[in-house]
Amino acid sequence: MKNILARGGIEFFAVLFGITISLWVEDWREDKDIQKKIAEDYINIKQEVKIDIENIENIILSIEGQINSLKKLIQYNEKKIDFNDSDVINNLKKITSPTFFGTQTAYNTSVSSGRLNFSKDMSVSNEISVLYEHFYKRLDTNSQIYDLRNQKLKSDYFMEFFQVTVGKQEISDSIKSVFFSTKTRNALYWILEFVENFYIYRLKDTKNQMLKTEQLISEFLQEQI
């Protein structure tokens, strides 16, 4: 009787051990598959971030050029330098809205799958989330503000200058009087203050986080080789 019980106990534990091992193996396979897909997500996110870095660098250069144009126009407006028709027209044409809106396809795909929260190195996922959920969103808000300010600048203050920036290459005395007005000067300062003291810094802060995120992803992927 004892032998039967002992044999039955051994068989029970053998079955239990077998089930435990099979479950462990299945969990291991699932985790390995998830980690593989997370690595693929990281690769796709890294590729998009790399493209965005090139894009934001170009935007920063454009913004820096626009800051110079705004300062030059203010100098003309305040009569600190002699008025030059062609240079004024050239700088007026540069007052555009070079704004940055990041690519989020790969990130959104990873988030919707839920995989981003199962990385074996959450520091990478956390930095990715900070980039998209904080820096990108904050920059999106500032980009929208910048777009709106430039639209208002042109519709409310620069309407008189359209004819000289789209074809006619001379500035009449009536247009000059508008250009030299305090209203125009305040409008130029209104744009310059935002782009110089806020927007350019949001761009550079975002670029730094993009570089940091790309580096962390690269290091993580290198460790998987």
Image: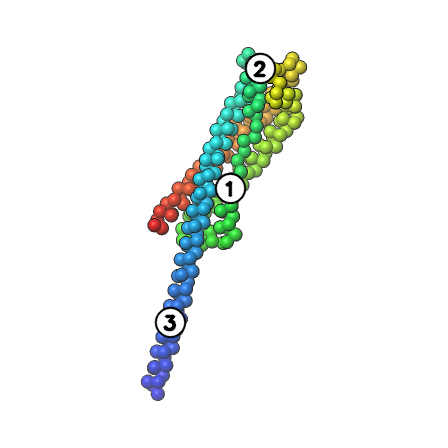
State whether residue 110 is above or below residue 81.
below
Determine if residue 5 is in view: yes
The three-letter code of the residue at mark 2 reads Asp
**Amino acid type of the residue tagged 3 in the rendering:** Gly
| Residue 109 horizontal/vertical position (percent) | 51, 50
Q: Is residue 205 visible?
A: no
Residue under numbered circle 2? 85
Secondary structure, mark 2, is helix
Residue indicated by mark 1:
103
Q: Residue at x 55, y 17 (%)?
A: 87
- The relative height of residue 144 versus residue 30 in the rendered view (above or below) is above
Quick check: 124 above or below 76? below
Q: In which quadrant will I find the N terminus?
A: bottom left
N-terminal of the two: label 3 or label 2? 3
Residue type at mark 1 is Thr
Q: Which mark is residue 18?
A: 3
